[in-house]
Amino acid sequence: MMQQERAPVPALSKKTEQPKECFLIQPKETNEDATKTRKRKKKKITDVLAKSEPKPGTPEDLQKLMKDYYSSNRSVIELEELTLPDSCFLKANDLTHSLSSYLKEICPKWVKLRKNHSEKKSVLMLIICGSAIRALELIRSMTAFRGDSKVMKLFAKHIKVQEQVKLLEKRVVHLGVGTPGRIKELIKQGGLNLNPLKFLVFDWNWRDQKLRRMMDIPEIRKEVFEILEMGVLSLCKSESLKLGLF
């Protein structure tokens, strides 16, 4: 009998190596990394202000802002000359007043005062705020106080400075409400004489959408201090002008 041919047996293949598991070891957090994380979580000033109780402005706040602003370029003697006398400050708003009630409190004889005012190119009371929109709000909110007083908008929006100069020359105006930039320009051009001014009120405590007061904005703060040096300081020292913080 013929022997059957045996099929060749395939050689055993080597056992394939299984892939080893790989574990990622996370680096330990260093002090530097922790500091960076804390920095990222640092609260913004708007968050702090939103949760904190609002504090009314005081005359000391204005005095301190002036000293801080001028300290880098004025001598000690010059800084002393910028100090406002305590007697020139009216009672500040304690955040319980509307504008009309505050103005009635600081100027109870307003009706008599405005009847005796006949000088053109001037106002008896000047209210300085941070924007044209805010100025319009203030004008609307003082209806109970102003009565028949002539009020003028002193801001740049839609009104040229030359037009305002002409209006001040033609009319007797009792109340002016506006922004420091335009008021400064009117004084500079001779359209607004500060000598008859009796009351200067700053819209101090109001905050915008970013929770900034008018004096927190560098441009506005600069213009306010420039107005103070254009005659306001000397009028305060002569006690013919009073300052109020609303």
Image: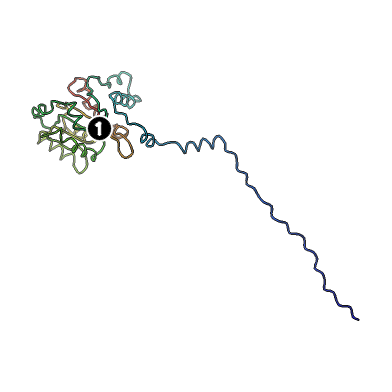
Density class for disc 1 (Cα within 10 Å; few <14, some 14-19, many ≥20) is many
Residue 13 position within the rendered picture, expressed as x and y whole percent measured from the top left? 77, 63
Label 1, on which residue? Answer: 203
Residue at 16%, 38% in the rendered image: 164
Q: Quadrant of the C terminus?
A: top left
Q: Is residue 36 left or right of residue 12?
A: left
Nearer to the camera, 121 or 62: 62
Where on the picture, by quarter, is residue 133?
top left
Residue 92 position within the rendered picture, expressed as x and y whole percent measured from the top left? 25, 26
Residue at 82%, 73% in the rendered image: 7
Q: Amino acid at mark 1?
A: Asp
Nearer to the camera, 160 or 34: 34
Q: Quadrant of the N terminus?
A: bottom right
Is the residue 7 above or below the residue 52 in the image?
A: below
Q: Of helix, strand and loop, which one carries label 1?
A: loop
Where on the picture, by quarter, is residue 93?
top left
Q: Is residue 109 left or right of residue 138?
A: left
Is the residue 127 above or below the residue 23 in the image?
A: above
Colour scheme: rainbow
Residue 42 position within the rendered picture, expressed as x and y whole percent measured from the top left? 45, 36
Nearer to the camera, 189 or 222: 222
Residue 80 position within the rendered picture, expressed as x and y whole percent measured from the top left? 29, 19
Number of numbered discs on residues: 1
For this orientation, the residue located farthest to the bottom is 1
Where on the picture, by quarter, is residue 6?
bottom right
For this orientation, the residue located farthest to the front is 96
